[in-house]
Image: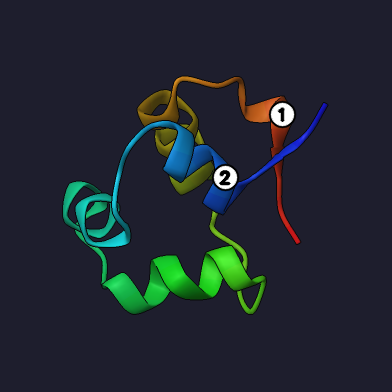
Amino acid sequence: MKISLKAARVNANFTQQEVANKLQISKHTVINWEKGKIKPKFAYLKVLSELYGIDIDYIFIE
């Protein structure tokens, strides 16, 4: 089963700002990823999967 970036973040109890701070990117970028306006680069997906505690194969990118 796939999980959206937003659901993965919420399940991991992170705010968008906390994720942005950890990845050293803007909150706006995180928002755009979650809305499907832009797609994160693979390197960010790898970090997000580790941060959220889920396998990268289960992250759904809109």
Local crowd at mark 1 within 10 Å, few (<14), some, or many (≥20)? some
Instruction: Give how far across and how far down residue 16 sits, in percent.
Output: 32, 59
Amino acid on which the number 2 mark rests in the picture:
Ala
Instruction: Give how far across and how far down residue 46 sits, in percent.
Output: 49, 33
Closer-to-camera residue (14/38)? 14
| Residue located 41% across and 65% down the image | 30
Residue ID for mark 2: 7
Report helix, strand or loop for mark 1: helix
Relative to 42, is 56 above or below? Answer: above
| Residue located 67% across and 71% down the image | 36
Relative to 45, is 16 above or below? Answer: below
Report helix, strand or loop for mark 2: helix
| Residue located 52% across and 42% down the image | 45
Amino acid on which the number 1 mark rests in the picture:
Tyr
Q: Which mark is residue 36?
A: none
Of tags 1 and 2, the one toward the viewer is 2
Between the C-alphas of marks 1 and 2, the distance is 12 Å
Q: Which mark is residue 58?
A: 1
